[in-house]
Image (cartoon, rainbow, N blue to C red):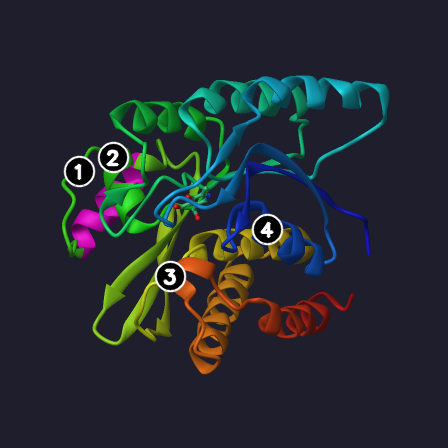
Amino acid sequence: MAHKRVLTIQDYSSMGRCSLTTALPIISSCLVECVGLPSCILSNHTQFKKWELCDLTSYMVPFVNMWDNYNHHFDAIYTGYLLDSQIDNTATIIKKLKENNTLIVIDPAMADNGVLYPGFTKEHIKKVKELISLGDIIIPNISELAFLTDNNIKDNYSPDEISSMLSSLSSNNQKKIILTGVKEEKYNMTYLYDKKITIFKNKNLGGKYHGSGDLFASIIVGSYLQTNNLNKSIKFAMKTTYKSIKYTIKENLDGVIYGLNFEQAIPYLSRKLKRYSKI
Ligand code: PXL
């Protein structure tokens, strides 16, 4: 099995599993090396009432430049939650480190349930649109897709509306899009837009869980590097997220704040990947 390495650029929130505290263990459990560049460090994510934030914006490029002294190759660069001021830096880092075979995955982590995360404004949407232009695979949820395509925010979208938002974000089929968070009766759906649309369904267990998008995107990145099969990676991501929700409910944990109990689903993910890739 060839060694693979991912650079992920997002915040480190000490309390409340999301961003780097999810990406690092999940990508490692896919047997892929994960280099985490923290864009800022928070005491806890911003769905808590209050937080302390240590902004590392000015360190991001110097950290990466320091690696010039060593050989390195990134099979993928994966970005998540970023402050407005960090998006230009992130673009600079992507342009500097991207080689011909480096996959760029952008999770435009900025909104959920129809609302932008605290502190984010129209300016943030504009900046994320610029970052998306560098991506090969984009992983928005339905709220982020609507914000990024200047559509109205509402509870439900028709299949035609979803299809036209996907085609507009993919800029003439240049990008693959994995859309999460579309609900239909008892189902939770994921759309893959790769010139055509494929829909994946899972039972919806209800409830809101912080960091589920970060968990999903991390599994896609880690397992796609191992399998080179996006459909398979989406199935792994959906099933592992589903199991993590089940473990969170079973142990009566507060998933709105502390995030998903994904640790217990890691053996499942590793087993599935091992069986598929014969690692
Ligand atoms: O999961 C998205 C996310 C990541 N990081 C921080 C957040 C959020 C969502 O609120 O606050 C700091």
Q: Are marks 1 and 2 in contact (CB under 8 Å)?
A: yes
Secondary element type, mark 4: helix
Q: Residue at position x 21%, y 73% from top?
A: 185
- Mark sitting earlier along the chain (3/2): 2
Disc 3 to disc 4, C-alpha distance: 16 Å
The quarter of the picture where the N terminus appears is bottom right
Q: Residue at position x 34%, y 50% from top?
A: 141
Disc 3 to disc 2, C-alpha distance: 27 Å
The amino acid type found where label 1 is placed reads: Asn
Rendered image: mark on residue 151: 1
The amino acid type found where label 2 is placed reads: Thr
For label 2, the residue is: 149
Q: Which label sits in the foreground, 2 or 4?
A: 4
Secondary element type, mark 2: loop
Placement of 147 over or under 184, stated as above or below? above
Can you tell me which quadrant of the image ligand 1 is in? top left
The amino acid type found where label 4 is placed reads: Thr
What segment carries the magenta color?
A: 159-168
| Label 3: how many Cα within 10 Å (few below 14, some 14–19, many 20+) | some
Q: Which label sits in the foreground, 3 or 2?
A: 3
Rendered image: mark on residue 44: none
| Label 4: how many Cα within 10 Å (few below 14, some 14–19, many 20+) | some
Residue 228 in the image: x percent, y percent? 63, 53
Instruction: Tell me: is circle 2 under 8 Å from ligand 1.
Output: no
- Mark sitting earlier along the chain (1/4): 4
Residue 182 in the image: x percent, y percent? 28, 59
For label 3, the residue is: 256
In this view of the protein, which residue sits in the foreground, 137 or 115?
A: 115
Secondary element type, mark 1: loop
